[in-house]
Image (spheres, grey):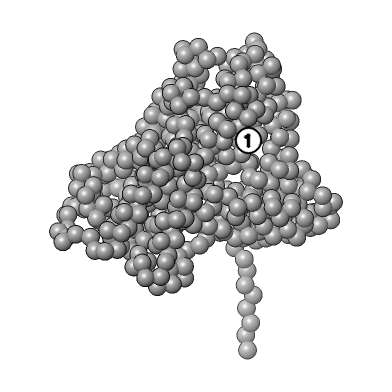
Amino acid sequence: MSSSITVLPWRQGISLLALLGALGWLLLGSADGSVLQAGIVVVLCIGLWATGWLPQWLTALIFFTLCTVAEVAPASTAFAGFESAATWLVFSGMVIGAAINHTGLGERVAARIGPHLASGYPQAVVGVGLLGLIASFVMPSAMGRIVLLVPILLTLVERFGYEPGNPGRAGVLLSGIMSSFLPTFTILPANVPNNVLMGASEAVLGFSPSYGEYLLLHFPVLGLLKWGLIMGLILWQFRAAAPSPFTAETSSGLDRGGRLMSVLLAFAVVMWMTDAWHGISPAWIGMLVGLVCLFPGSGLLPARPLQQMNLEPFIYVAGIVSLGALAHDSGLGEAIAGQLLDVLPLSPESTVGNFAWLSVIATILGMLVTLPGVPAVMTPLAPQLADVTGWSPSAVVMSQVIGFSTVVFPYQSPPLIIGLLTSGVSIRQAMRITLPLALITIVLLWPLDFIWWRWLGVI
């Protein structure tokens, strides 16, 4: 009788050693939810998410376990992600996406727009990207946009002949996902961090930026120019042949399930577009539609749909949101920001330096507390920063957008991650865009944005 020893791959081995080391440190240290303990958990989980050495959902479960076993944070903080509207919008989005595919509605929409995009690979990438960018102006929820786009994009790439492993498949999918998310930090209601900034500014400083002011200040450089860079990077990193000829299929029309799904989607889009009027969170609008899809006898999903649904994104997003809550509630974010402020050379005589360093602070915080956490941490510091820099509090608040719109790693944003996980695009493929885009943004777009701000007279 023979026996064998299973050896972990070196990356998983390092991950296991880091996990055991962190657990030992936390258990031996004082279990009082200190900033140091929170920092250990946050750094470990961010490292695992950024490297991808462990599955994203497993890292999320590690986060929950460490926080609970070592009493790093109360349950209300450790599991805050499951109370978050963003997490339940993810769940409803998965349900809605499955229903769009099951009823054939995605195929019908793809058949309508596909022939206009199939004349060439660049036309397909840019056309899909333009679709995502335009949707950002009419749908305020980034998660909602991705929920609707991904099933349609998956059908499109299949009809284009881009099978899994084909770079054209990743290129088209990334174009739609990133265009509906990355440039939208410059459109006021189109992303969660923007809305957090608006609410925090109103609470701390007594004012919030208007839609037009915000758009004029940020969209020309960080929105439109960045979108052009995204298109160029995708075409460079994912080169592919032209799509297969797109032949529209003749059909007698949608069946009962397809018609019902069309009505439900129309309802969701109208409610998402008017959320500023009725005040209902996009998450609960999505859940209403998702419940109808899940209801037995609706015909919108197969029998036992949850058994056929991949719930890994749901756990992952809950973990990311909870990590942001831990970083904020423990004081870790404020401690890091305070340490940076103590060592950075901010002064009224250095406008260029102030612009650069404030952007750097927001970018670093975005990697530690995730993007929605940046305005939550930075906005209360705005009066102090205004005194140090000589800027107006409004300009200090607006500088955060430069930082949290510079996305380095996909884990920083739940909508981006959900788009990747539901479309089958790997984190590594996405980082082939986010890493060079962040570098180009810092080297090229930040200086251009500074010139734009000076021309507008903001600083």
Q: Nearer the viewer, residue 448 or 311?
A: 311
Q: Are there few (<14), some (14-19), or many (20+) residues within 10 Å of tag 1?
A: many
Q: Nearer the viewer, residue 386 or 140?
A: 140
Image side of residue 56 versus residue 66, left or right:
left
Eyeballing the image, is 205 above or below 14?
above
Provide residue 263's location: percent of width, then percent of height: 31, 54
Mark 1 residue type: Ala
Say which residue appears at 72% left-offset and 40% top-offset: 332
In what quadrant of the picture does the C terminus appear?
top right
Say which residue appears at 19% left-offset and 59% top-offset: 253
Provide residue 214's location: percent of width, then percent of height: 47, 25
Secondary structure beneath dot 1 equals helix
Residue 273 visible in the displayed image: yes
Provide residue 424's location: percent of width, then percent of height: 42, 56
User: Residue 24 appears in which quarter of the rendering?
Assistant: bottom right
In what quadrant of the picture does the N terminus appear?
bottom right
Q: Which residue is mark 1?
A: 376
Image side of residue 192 versus residue 118, left or right:
right
User: Residue 384 appears in which quarter of the rendering?
Assistant: top right
Residue 174 visible in the displayed image: no
Q: Nearer the viewer, residue 320 or 97?
A: 97
Say which residue appears at 48% left-offset and 38% top-offset: 191
Image side of residue 17 versus residue 57, left or right:
right
Q: Farthest bottom residue?
A: 1
